[in-house]
Image (cartoon, coloured by chain):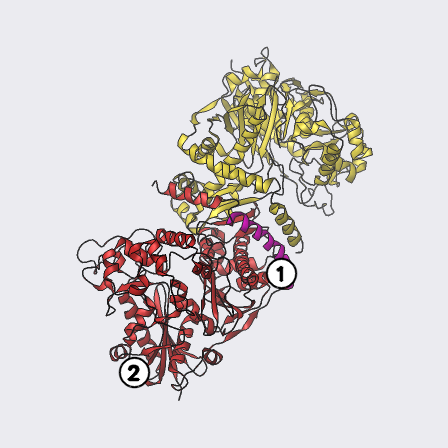
Chain colours: A red, B yellow
Amino acid sequence: MAKYALGVDFGTESARALLVDVADGREVATFVARYPHGVIDEALPRPVAGSGCPPKLSKDWALQSPDDWLLTLKQSVRATMKASGVKAEDVIGIGIDFTACTMLPVAADSTPFCKMKKHEKNPNAWPKLWKHHAAQGQADRINATARRMGCDFLDRYGGKLSSEWMFAKSLQILEEAPGIYNEAARLLEGADWVVWQMTGVEKRNACTAGYKAAFEPKSRTYPPKEFFAAVNPAWANLVEEKLSTDIYPQGAVAGGLTAAMAKTLGLKEGTPVAVANVDAHVAVPAATITGPAKMLMIMGTSICHMVLGTEPRKVEGMCGYVWEGIIPGYYGFEAGQSGAGDILAWFVENAVPAAYHAEAAKRKKDLHGVLEEKAAALRPGESGLVALDWLNGNRSILVNVDLSGMVLGITIATKPEEIYRALIESLAFGTRKIIDSFESSGVAVDELYACGGLPYKNKLLMQIFSDVTGRTIKVARSEQTCALGSAMFGALAAGKKGGGYDTIEAAAKKMAGVRREVFRPNRKAKAVYDPLYAEYEKLHDYFGRGVNPVMKALKTLHFEQAGKR
Amino acid sequence: MAKYALGVDFGTESARALLVDVADGREVATFVARYPHGVIDEALPRPVAGSGCPPKLSKDWALQSPDDWLLTLKQSVRATMKASGVKAEDVIGIGIDFTACTMLPVAADSTPFCKMKKHEKNPNAWPKLWKHHAAQGQADRINATARRMGCDFLDRYGGKLSSEWMFAKSLQILEEAPGIYNEAARLLEGADWVVWQMTGVEKRNACTAGYKAAFEPKSRTYPPKEFFAAVNPAWANLVEEKLSTDIYPQGAVAGGLTAAMAKTLGLKEGTPVAVANVDAHVAVPAATITGPAKMLMIMGTSICHMVLGTEPRKVEGMCGYVWEGIIPGYYGFEAGQSGAGDILAWFVENAVPAAYHAEAAKRKKDLHGVLEEKAAALRPGESGLVALDWLNGNRSILVNVDLSGMVLGITIATKPEEIYRALIESLAFGTRKIIDSFESSGVAVDELYACGGLPYKNKLLMQIFSDVTGRTIKVARSEQTCALGSAMFGALAAGKKGGGYDTIEAAAKKMAGVRREVFRPNRKAKAVYDPLYAEYEKLHDYFGRGVNPVMKALKTLHFEQAGKR
């Protein structure tokens, strides 16, 4: 009798459920449910805010609704189950993954503060989505204090904690809405909150605690109380009063589905639920990676790079490394590029002439396809262009949002496909820079794996990444890599006895896979890209390391002048 | 009784005749006649080449046909006269201007070699157009030799003679077609050849001799024989045997129309003809400039900067200075930017999205107009961009065709009109750099004047040039500034006795004018542009002066890779 595991992937705009055959990873059914409120970044939802005008949000705010999470959990799981025809008793386990850090204040019984009449009009009562950027001031002070105090936890995060993470966001609540902060029994990740709703118990996961809240799983410690007190005395007891040191490793069981939740989802009460995961990280075993030196690139609007290692290593400008943050028994290292698909989308939307639109329409291709075809006909270096891939700032190595993009080498003979190709090459150079940084710090990167939207859409991009990095790239078999990873952790929650697996390695062997098509580096192309990469590196250091801080100056001027409107 | 002067402007693709009222500069009639053969840059014309396949031209060749010049002279003058209703006896003088250096080998009776059966199939027998670039190898050797020998004439030309000029082109004829070189009685400018056809006498003008053949009018000397011999022993007697030291200043009379030519043109025999002029230079008095510190910018596909001075001055990367090369009594200084209108045209053709095309169509505006409107709504610095205007290389200051364009500061929020504006700003920065270079070398530039196509089409561009340079810009009243200038020299050839003028100052006072609309620098904009210009300068020096020779490396790679096709 076949057994199945359910994975639910909570993204920025929607949640996806995926039902997977535990024996071979076959994807039986899937369903995507969009959040009714989407990303809340202009004003709080109207019904919640009562009859008056809903509070407007300042720029850089990005919230979500916990009702949306529960509603789409129900919709996506029910629709998937229905489409699959699988019986509830054959679902042996559930895993979920989430964007992070997406955090919210809750009461002791897990009630979100945004669901309380007295707090619902306060934006700080609402879940702050990962891309909420309004706590930059707090992040700056946190980093300055940590540096001043010589806190060694900074080493694990490339020298800087992001404004997107738990500390900056919680400090923002304290400083802007002290009432909420003080009254809150818990500040926790949306990931853990959903698991709490499913199982009735609070079981925080090590992945978010490690990558987003500076928790060190080996010693089971957070940064010291003195650090928090130095930033803001009222913040001294953050860990004891709002967080928890009761953290569960990836692969652990959070509990069984409650009777109520089982009924809501149409599943069996007591079905094992895994502790939650982060979307990017859960994709690693789903791309078959369960050991060191294989780097996964999640390639979508941006690129997330993850690799396992056996030793802690300080890597320049890395997002972070966490013991067992991805897979038990390894350090999980994370880095990233803050733009990729969105840079190409920007180009296609803003810089492709009408003639190309006409050609695409005539040939019934999309514009990306037409550009890819024309760009693929060029030789490496033929464009005469080199670009810097910082149109969204630089996340890894330089960790600087004030950096910006550049295209150099333009002539009046330059064609759109040449710029398009140069932008792709710049992304590949950015990834190579990250790989070089890992390797020179002692974290091996022998092979590349890819998932996300881009690898399935743009073969030219994949080949260029392979040529530039000189590495083979394998592509995850499943296009729903995150949801598959969650299903694998669901199978792990069931355990071998429950029809699943006892180790993530065993689950990966059976349930994960890569495609037959492998991108292999072309030696001749690599030989042309090596000197081009050297040019990229020179520009990277000149503009990125402060020799010529023109990009910062231009951003400052931009904001000043745009602000006068 | 009203008197008239005729100006004929020989351009790259066509000739324009303009009939002007001598009393007030009123433009009575004009006519443009296109050269039937246009620019000859692929193969020699078929009828000339006989029944066989016409010889193909290598890349970088650009020729013209002398028949085209005579035919369009006839067509344009006759059509203009006809349209004007003016009688031949009321035309008191004629002046012409020409592209330069556009040169050809001729026999002692002025027969072009390309009109001789035995030479017509040899491309070196044909007039080499100003933009003929196939003599770069010769130019490089000429410059290397001049530098090695410490020839001080280099100082007058910013340190370098161009491959577009007389020496490189004549050396190419010698080395590729020695038979033609040796047999030729004369190598001369098309400008002087046409005047010869009109008057029956060879009267070479000082403007082309000075700017294009290193003739020094004060001493009436060319570079010494030893210099030519050092480059190529067979070239030693270039000056004595092929050129002439019998050079006439701007404003002199070449002679009267021959009977035959008078009949051809429908004018009176003996009508005074001025010595020829160069198109750019003749525009200076036509824009009312007859004294120092007023810089004329001829703004079309590229920009030519001209200013008069009282002392010889060595200016970095200038095109050249010539005593009385523009106006009697002054040194005429020339500099230039190798791209302007063509850079904006490149952008409009290659980088403007379909939505903007649709908007332009809907609003019945052209794309430039839509972009200009959107760009004008931005504040200085608001784009967050800075660009280098070298999409066609750099002519003045750096004199380097291997430089290329750059746009820096791009984000995924960057709009097409922001890049468009940044390109315009980069052109203004390039002009400011040239002005700064003149001023720091002791050539004053107090005020700017403009003519060419751009000033009448793009007000935003003019305002940005004014804001960036901090200088007032006046625009020549006539859009046919060159033809008007030629007509003014025609009036000068007639002299006061003949119903014209004795000095170019007097002619300019009556016949030339500027428009009422003046572009005045906005102090606030200038204050924003000053630091932006400082950023431009830093990038200009970093990429332009060899600190980071990446542009040259990219060009080399481009040609290597493109060459493999």
Corner quadrant of residue A182: bottom left
Q: Tell me which chain the residue with mark 2 is part of.
A: A
Q: Is residue A72 left or right of residue B75?
A: left
| Residue closest to the far front | A226
* Residue at (50, 56) in percent of width and height: A397
**Depth check, front residue: B342 or B84:** B342
Q: Residue furthest top?
A: B497
Q: Secondary structure at mark 1?
A: helix
Tell me which segment is drawn in magenta. Answer: A523-544
Residue type at numbered disc 1: Lys
Q: Amino acid at mark 2?
A: Lys
Where is residue A92? Give x, y as percent. 36, 83
* Residue located at (35% from left, 83% from top): A86
- Report, in whole angstroms, how far the alpha carbon at label 1 lies from the one at label 2: 54 Å
Q: Position of residue B382 (x, y in %)?
A: 41, 42
Query: Where is A525 relative to B401, above or below?
Result: below
Residue A160 percent location from the top left of the image: 43, 56
- Residue B378, horizontal then vertical, whole percent: 39, 40
Residue A527 magenta: yes
Give residue A268's mark.
2
Q: Quadrant of the N terminus of chain A?
A: bottom left
Please state, as top left, top right, bottom left or bottom right, where the C terminus of chain A lies in the image. top left
Pointer 1 chain: A
Question: Which numbered tag is attached to residue A526?
Answer: 1
User: Quick one: SS at disc 2?
Assistant: loop
Residue B55: say if magenta: no
